[in-house]
Amino acid sequence: MAWNPHASFTAIEPEVDLPSKWKVFKGYIDIALGRLPASYDWRSHLVIPPAKYQGTCNSCTSFAVSAAIEIATLIKKGGSAQDVAAQHMHTCIVNRGAENPQNICPKGIEPRRLLNLLVEYGYATSLADGSPFPPAACLRVATNSKIQGFALFTSAAARSSITTGPLVTDMYVWDGFFDYTTDRAPLYTPDTTRGHPRLHSVCVVGYLHDGWIIKNSFGT
């Protein structure tokens, strides 16, 4: 499952030299003509905020969706990146009504369910992403921003969709994923002998010919 918040977009990029601008413009022409580039990476067009760290909470879906909202807002409006509060989202939207902090971190959510909640309840911005956000503070924080909607895509359509905005998806990971770094290998390849598969939500920001480029929530 993947999420793309915009059917069309106007890319607003940082100031770059003319050859780079032409390369980006040519990429959009190729996309419009149905010729997908061999690779695509939103980091080449936007200054994407650094990856955050979800800590020990099962809040990966909130972090993935928050990252996608931040990137989609940059694509649509430009300017400075919006800081969407992921831990507030996990406590006050995913676990709304919960009073005991010990019951909040263990409970995750599937991306589509969270996106439906954000259409209804909205999200908060510019808050510290400490783990977990205290439930007693939920009523004191306004959620003035809402997403207008989202679309579901099959894996086959994901590459063409990523060129218009970020995607949110679940992926299976094994124990080796939690100590993987790009210094060890350029691509993460699951070692299925290490533990049991778990679902982990990530924000997809591009693709290569043999893999996906993801913004993860395990820090830098």
Image (spheres, grey):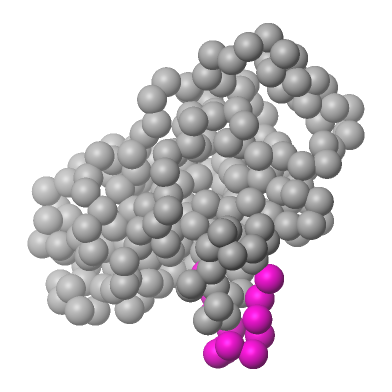
Residue 198, magenta (yes or no): yes
The image shows residue 169 at horizontal and vertical percentages of 59, 60
For the N terminus, the quadrant is: bottom right
Name the main secondary structure of what is drawn in magenta. loop
Q: Which residues, given as a range, are shown in magenta?
A: 189-200
Residue 202 point in image, percent of width and height = 53, 59
- Residue at x 59%, y 65% (from the top left corner): 184
Q: Where 143 sits versus 25, above or below? A: below
Which residue is farthest top? 18
Q: Which of the pair 17/14 is nearer the observer?
A: 17
Left or right? Give the position of 126 relative to 215: left
Q: Position of residue 187 (x, y in %)?
A: 67, 61
Is residue 217 shown to the viewer in this render? Answer: yes
The residue lying at 64 percent from left, 90 percent from top is 193
The quadrant where residue 196 appears = bottom right
Examine the image and state in which quarter residue 145 appears. Answer: top left
Q: Tell whether 214 sits left or right of 24.
A: left
Q: In the image, residue 109 lies at what x, y percent?
A: 44, 69
Q: Describe residue 99's horizontal placement relative to residue 219 as left or right.
A: left
User: From what the image shows, is residue 79 above or below residue 195?
Assistant: above
Tell me if residue 103 is in the magenta stretch.
no
Q: Residue at x 38, y 25 (%)?
A: 80
Residue at point 52%, 36% (across, down): 72
